[in-house]
Image (tube, rainbow, N blue to C red):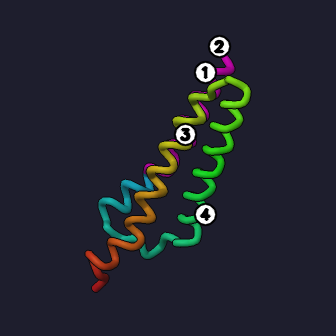
Amino acid sequence: MINETIGWIGNILFAICGFPQVVKTFRSKSVKDLSAMFLWMWFLGEILTFIYIVLGDWETGIAHFPLYFNYMVNTIMAAYLIFAKYYYPKKYPAN
């Protein structure tokens, strides 16, 4: 039980660590300081690691729900920031 609690706490913290950047980007509509390479590597790393965990869990029959939560939330945040990186400069050009 303690192991599961530690897993949930750690993965919730990892899952929300990108949230301040998402909120800042959403409010400011500014993405000029976000590296596209970083965003794509983050996104692809989340997707590939999530697939690795799911396949491993499928083979062993053990589900790691804290990890699923973490990787799903981070994938959504990275996808939003990638969207913003390409959409906001066209919609809200810098003056």
What is the CA distance from the residue labelled 2 to the residue labelled 3?
A: 19 Å
The foreground one among 60 and 32 is 60
* Label 1: how many Cα within 10 Å (few below 14, some 14–19, many 20+): few
Q: Which residue is labeled 2 in the image?
A: 1
Labelled pair 2, 3 in contact (Cβ < 8 Å)? no
From the viewer's side, name the closer residue of 38 and 75: 75
58 to the left or right of 18: right
Kind of residue sitting beneath label 2:
Met
Query: Is residue 13 highlighted in magenta?
Result: yes
Image point (37%, 59%), residue name: 24
Residue 5 versus residue 86 in the image, above or below: above
Label 3 or label 1, whichever lies nearer to me, is 3
Image coordinates for residue 94, horizontal then vertical, percent: 31, 82
Q: Which residue is mark 1?
A: 5
Q: Are marks 4 and 1 in contact (CB under 8 Å)?
A: no
Residues drawn in magenta: 1-19
Label whose residue precedes the other's in the sequence (4 or 2)? 2
What is the spatial separation of the Cα atoms under label 4 and label 1, in whole angstroms?
29 Å
Left or right of 48? Residue 74 is left
* Residue type (three-letter) at the residue carrying disc 1: Thr
Question: Of label 3 and label 4, which has the lower sequence position?
Answer: 4
Work out whether 73 lies above or below 92: above
Q: Secondary structure at mark 1?
A: helix
